[in-house]
Amino acid sequence: VLLLLVLYVLQGIPLGLAGSVPLILQSKSASYTDQAFFSFVFWPFSLKLLWAPLVDAVYVRRFGRRKSWLVPTQYVLGLFMLYLSTRVDLLLGDGEGRGPDVVALTVAFFLFEFLAATQDIAVDGWALTMLSRENVGYASTCNSVGQTAGYFLGNVLFLALESASFCNKYLRFQPQPRGIVTLADFLFFWGAVFLITTTLVALLKKENKELMPTKEETKGITDTYRLLFSIIKMPAVLTFCLLILTAKVGFSAADAVTGLKLVEEGVPKEHLALLAVPMVPLQIILPLIISKYTAGPQPLNTFYKAMPFRLLLGLEFAFLVWWTPKVKHEGGFPVYYYAVVLLSYALHQITLYSMYVAIMAFNAKVSDPLIGGTYMTLLNTVSNLGGNWPSTVALWLVDPLTVKECVGAQEQTCGTTVAAELCTKAGGSCVTTLDGYYVESVICVILGFGWWFLLGPKFKKLQDEGQSSWKCKRTN
């Protein structure tokens, strides 16, 4: 269990780092279209299914089925981090007229996440054989606790230590112009950690030989893809996929845009990240509490019950963003403001985890153990994708939905970047009359409740299907 935890923590680090980049970009005033483009970085985790069969089927027998992938992947991740640490300051823009190179950043972090996702496939598969039968339930706990811890290190800890104002205020006696660590230092450090841990795993940890798959189980790659296709074609699975792909549309504005809006309104990004600190115990305790409710035969009830609360929090988030500039004063924001944000975040986490743990429990419950890795990954993949595409779309739509007017110059508009420049040249300035984020928040909540009323009951019915509806009929 300890090894699993360590592996999942390592996996959380690239995720956390990638999660901190949008906040850094936002503080360098990147557009929402740029942010939407960068959000593709979070897709490999949702699409890992496409190469999961390769990871399951191709391996060096002497070395071990999972280690064949885990070890090389982590080495490449480590080396890639070391290399990126030399380039990343250039990519983020130096502030002297050069903006961030969003395309290059996206490509670099996309590769990064791609490798982390590959490591995830290997670890997930290994978890099923590493833990004894009665402890397999802990696999998902290790996953969520480990990834949360890794994400925390890569995101919160990094943003706090990277921020000059935070370090000067809390950690230093003499103020200095930059934080204690830069992104480059951080990448270098974790790159080294990855290389060391991987070497230890490669040398010291053996896989269970007696659990090595028989000829029967390791079908060729084409067979695995055929199998995937036949899983997806099963009516129960197909219904699940279609429903979960649309279930999270209602949360997209709240989840993807709110944090960036708060940074835009002047909340320091490291303060936002630090609000995650009190969340960590919550995130560790929540899955343990919620799993009591989701462990039974009907995990999806929890999902269904949590949904309307999470949708309403979307409106509350929009209100929060609207309220932010109103309470801002010279020295920043009052303590009670952060208390309100913290409370909102905490409530949001409770609803989010209730839904997340419920889905994980449901996926584990219906997965066919004979093809555990592929089946479970398929269901989790679709669940993740259901959160990714709405987020990307939500970020993309903020700019087009925003209405700006040119104030102080006649007959000028602010519809496009060029028009905005003309407006400024004519002595005017672009003023936002309607922020696309608010439009989007309302649309999302309406769509979300529509889903909850019309499709929610259908989704809940899936857990009443017999085991046979989820068993894959294998054709030889």
Image: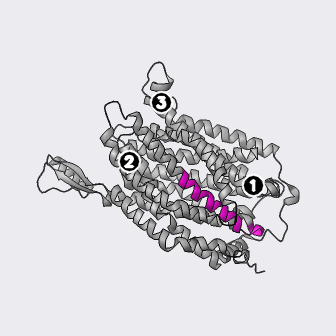
Give the distance between the C-alpha atoms of the residues marked 2 and 1, in whole angstroms: 41 Å
Left or right, 214 with respect to 338, comes to right
Q: Give how far across and how far down residue 290 sits, in percent.
A: 63, 54
User: What amino acid does circle 1 point to?
Assistant: Ala
Question: What residue did someone put label 2 on?
Answer: 320
Under circle 2, the secondary element is: helix
Q: Is residue 243 above or below residue 288?
A: below
- Looking at marks 3 and 1 on the same chain, the residue that comes earlier in the sequence is marked by 1
Which color scheme does this rendered protein use?
one colour
Q: Which residue is disc 1 drawn over?
A: 127
Q: Residue at x 65, y 45 (%)?
A: 9
- Vertical order, 44 against 80 (above or below): below
Is most of the magenta stretch helix, strand or loop? helix
Between residue 259 and residue 206, name the one nearer to us.
259
Q: Nearer the observer, disc 2 or disc 1?
A: 2
Mark 3 or 1, which is nearer the eye?
1
Residue under numbered circle 3: 179
Dot 2: few (<14), some (14–19), or many (≥20) neighbours within 10 Å? some
Image quarter of the C terminus:
bottom right
Of residues 174 and 57, the one drawn nearer to the viewer in this rendering: 174
